[in-house]
């Protein structure tokens, strides 16, 4: 019996070693429950892409945000086609709001305004599906 | 000696099992994804939307491995008017997302949505992480 128990324990220990990290990673991902969504047509797309866009990620990373969609290619299904779509995932509505309220994000808003000009834009936070 | 071999084999089997799981999860996390986005600004025909569209909306998504990651009327405006209802569906790839969109079942949903809402829909390439 001892031998069997040892065997089982050894197998469990080895599996745990392999599994522990990814399982917690997966759990952390399934908690991503808020998304910042924006659709922007900046007046100066070139300046926006080269000067403003690279400044954004360092401002939301401290709040656990990560890009889900980063102005990639889009295919229209129905209605008006989108412009420049960005989706950033956060663990909660509070985390997303905390990023928007942060000094670091507010500091880059004048640069954003400069390249946005009179371009069209929308931005909102939506709640993710609970898992 | 037999016991040692058995122990070693059990540990090896466990480690292999763990490692395979790790790779499976990593593959899921890093594959280029695509997202179906449905942006509804107004529901103009609640009856059609709730009684005809909603009960049929999920099967075409799951048939192509899609997963609803946003399906909400809980939206907070930052700039401009927020949507009334917003839906984001994650797919493993652009091919899967397009197969979903081109399916007969989804075309029926699209027709019901056009009839009952003011909305737009598109597929977006996922960010490379």
Image (cartoon, rainbow, N blue to C red):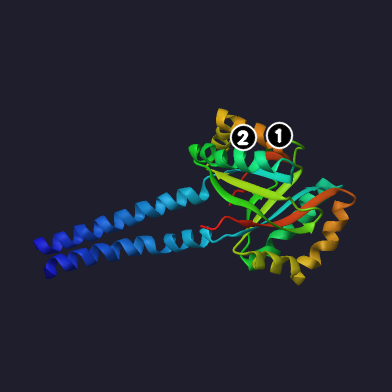
Q: Position of residue B79 (x, y in %)?
A: 80, 57
**Could you tell me residue A70's position as x and y percent?**
67, 49
Where residue A94 sits: x, y (%)? 66, 68
Residue ID at (70%, 38%): B116
Closer to the observer: label 2 or label 1? 1
Residue behind mark 1: B115
Residue B83: tell me if it is visible.
yes
> Closer to the camera, A48 or A97?
A97
Give residue A7's quadrant in the image.
bottom left
Marker disc for residue A3: none
Residue A34's place in the image compared with B120, above or below, is below
Residue B99 relative to residue B26: left or right: right
Height in image: A90 above or below B27?
below
Residue furthest right as drawn:
A118
The chain letter for the residue carrying disc 2 is B
- Name the quadrant containing residue A111: bottom right
Question: Which residue position holds label 2?
Answer: B109
Quadrant (top left, top right, bottom left, bottom right) of the N terminus of chain A: bottom left
Q: Are marks 2 and 1 on the same chain?
A: yes
Indicate the position of residue A116 as horizontal and vertical percent values: 85, 52
């Amino acid at each position: 019996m001892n031998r069997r128990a040892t065997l089982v324990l050894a197998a469990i220990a080895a599996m745990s070693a392999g599994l522990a990290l990814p399982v917690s990673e997966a759990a952390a991902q399934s908690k991503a429950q808020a998304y910042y969504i924006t659709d922007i047509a900046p007046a100066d797309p070139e300046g926006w892409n080269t000067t403003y866009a690279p400044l954004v990620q360092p401002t939301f990373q401290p709040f656990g945000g990560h890009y889900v969609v980063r102005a990639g290619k889009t295919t229209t299904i129905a209605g008006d086609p989108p412009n420049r779509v960005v989706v950033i995932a956060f663990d909660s509505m509070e985390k997303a709001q905390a990023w928007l309220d942060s000094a670091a994000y507010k500091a880059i808003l004048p640069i954003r305004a400069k390249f946005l000009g009179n371009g069209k834009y929308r931005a909102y936070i939506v709640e993710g599906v609970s898992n | 000696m037999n016991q040692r071999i058995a122990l070693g084999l059990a540990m090896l089997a466990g480690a292999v099992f763990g490692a395979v799981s790790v790779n499976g999860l990593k593959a899921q996390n890093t594959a280029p994804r695509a997202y179906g986005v449905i942006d509804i600004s107004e529901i103009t025909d609640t009856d059609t939307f709730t009684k005809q569209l909603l009960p049929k909306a999920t099967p075409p998504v799951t048939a192509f491995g899609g997963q609803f990651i946003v399906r909400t009327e809980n939206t907070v405006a930052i700039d401009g008017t927020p949507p009334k209802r917003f839906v984001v569906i994650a797919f493993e790839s652009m091919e899967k997302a397009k197969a979903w969109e081109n399916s007969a079942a989804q075309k029926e949903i699209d027709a019901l949505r056009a009839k009952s809402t003011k909305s737009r829909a598109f597929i977006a390439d996922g960010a490379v992480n």
